[in-house]
Image (spheres, rainbow, N blue to C red):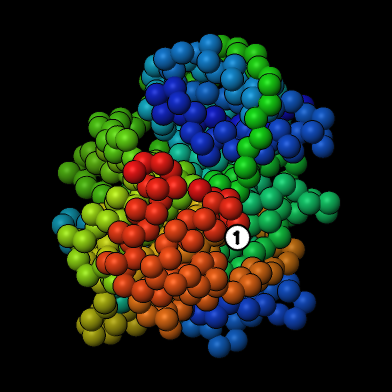
Amino acid sequence: MAIVVFADHHQGEIKKAALEAIFYASEWATTQQQEVIAVVIGEVPHPSSLENLGQYGAHRVYYVNSSWLNDFDARLYSLVFREILEQLQAQICVLPHDFNGRALAPYLAAQWQAGLLTGVCSLPESDGSFQKQVFSGKALAWMHVHTARKVITLLPNTFSVKQQDRKATVENWQPSQVKADQRKIRVKELRTTQGRVPLSEASIIVSGGRGLKGPENWGMIEELAKVLGAATACSRPVADAGWRPHHEHVGQTGLTVRPNLYIAIGISGAIQHLAGVNGSKYIVVINKDPEAPFFQAADYGIVGDAFEVVPRLIEAVKKFKGLS
Amino acid sequence: MKVLVCISKTADTTAKISFTADQKSFNESGVQFIINPYDEWYALVRAVELKEQYPDTELHLISVGGPDVEPILRKALAIGGDMAFRVDLQPISIEPVAISIAEHVRQQGYDLIFTGKETIDYNGSGVGGYLAGLLDWPFISLATSFTWDGQIATVEREIDGGREIAEAMLPLVVSCQKGIAEQRIPNMRGIMAARTKPLQVIAAPEKAKENFVSIDHFALPQKKSGVHLIEPGNEEELVRLLHEEARVI
């Protein structure tokens, strides 16, 4: 039996959340004596490099190299997956809980007649239950999937992958039940922000709030993010005021993030904001108001004026990294 | 065009989250319930805007739940929509909700279905995709913009570190998030009109009563042990702690 994983990629580069999903599946597989098969859909520039997915725990890679599958489409990808899962008589499919995984997983679960559990943050425990964050991170729930077939999405940044010295076998695989003319969605344009760390994958996030007074003051936020190799984010009022783009909004009605380090600057820490970030491993709060509720959720804090603290912090990080 | 918007009831964003003594269920006492923000602010408002643009649009709302979701559906009808349906079933997980709605869609026939990107209580983000999968319709998730020119829908969606713009024909299922529309406050006329709009209760299909996924128990996350404050001016100490103690840089 096999655990099948969606190895989502961007122009051949397998996404971090997908590598975590492969590693998660391999940890799961060791207890079940199962094989891990990573499925790569759409053309990649260097197919032979896919053998490196073995380092994350994949035994085999199914490479579906059809150009008409280059653009993600939940329906078409689901048809491909269903065919693979049926051919392998697999019972478990693992996907990253990111933008594409979240669209594909429910579609596939419906078509493959499987139970669906999204955003899990643990391997199955001894009673078979999975841990998952609920109420936007304000609580945890342990859930059972009662169906034989299971589609599981893994919350990004939950498992730190351990690489091993192994290579996967790469096999070309072609669907026989899905054809190019079944495509009903045409991707017109793809815009990616080059050179930036996507928020969902970032291990460090530097986030700014209203305390920064205006968009013109974001230079130091961006500089701190740059020296730390971090992504930038913001609170809801900042996105609503148009100081920063909506996709940077972190919180209950924005993006939920789980970085290793979340640095909140000039954010008071409203409950809705905390809900989006309290899965972070460490939280640093910089705020001039010692009563800011965010300090209660923080690991480290500096009570001080951001306009003085942040430039000094940038210098301290540069010194630490040997950049100055 | 006939449009369906899926509405879910959730605890208010400011609600204090607690559980019953056995940790088996969410403690609802003293909790305010609202329309799931993604369903209300984005899915519903964008659908109402489409009806304003194309007045012959028929706009229906649907929710799966007990009689307690009816006030939520009335609130939604105050923002817009011609009529609402309640599938009489206590929703336990994604699958029964999607199966119930799919059955209704097969009977009524729709061209376009909007859902919110996820509910803020169980954060499943699965109903839209599962529903589309059951119907075998194309599905676009996490839409930040939706336009329809009478023939082709143009949808912008968020992807890792970027944007994707896609074109699709109807029928189509779209899950909506921030950017697709702006929150609207219902006016008095809307609230009055909502009182008399039809709200029909329908039975859930048998398949929706199966047990797919269930919650065993809940827990609140462990509290932080307390913040370690560092004096301003001593930022180098913070960097040292992040490196040596937290090991995150």
Q: Nearer the viewer, residue A185 or A266?
A: A266
**Relative height, residue A162 to residue B177 (above, below):** above
**Relative height, residue B20 to residue A155 (above, below):** below
Tell me the residue at 65%/17% (across/down): A168
Tell me the residue at 19%/44% (across/down): B150
Image coords of residue B54 (percent x, y): 17, 55
Q: Nearer the viewer, residue A303 or A211?
A: A303
Amino acid carrying mark 1 in the image? Gln
Residue lying at the far bottom in this picture: please name it.
B30
Q: What is the chain letter for disc 1?
A: A
Image coords of residue A313 (percent x, y): 37, 58
Residue A166 image-quadrant placement:
top right
Q: Is residue A17 something one can see in this rendering?
A: yes
Count up the numbered dots.
1
Image coords of residue A45 (percent x, y): 42, 15
A44 on left or right of A1: left
Q: Nearer the viewer, residue A22 or A232?
A: A232
Tell me the residue at 44%/72% (across/down): B231
Tell me the residue at 44%/47% (across/down): A320
Residue A135 image-quadrant placement:
bottom right
Image coords of residue A295 (percent x, y): 48, 74
Label 1 neighbourhood size at 10 Å, few (<14), some (14-19), many (20+)? many
A2 on left or right of B96: right
Q: Secondary structure at mark 1?
A: strand
Q: Nearer the viewer, residue B107 or A11?
A: A11
**Relative height, residue A292 to residue A146 (above, below):** below
Q: Is residue B7 something one can see in this rendering?
A: no
Q: In the rendered image, which residue does mark 1 sit on?
A: A133
B16 on left or right of A124: left
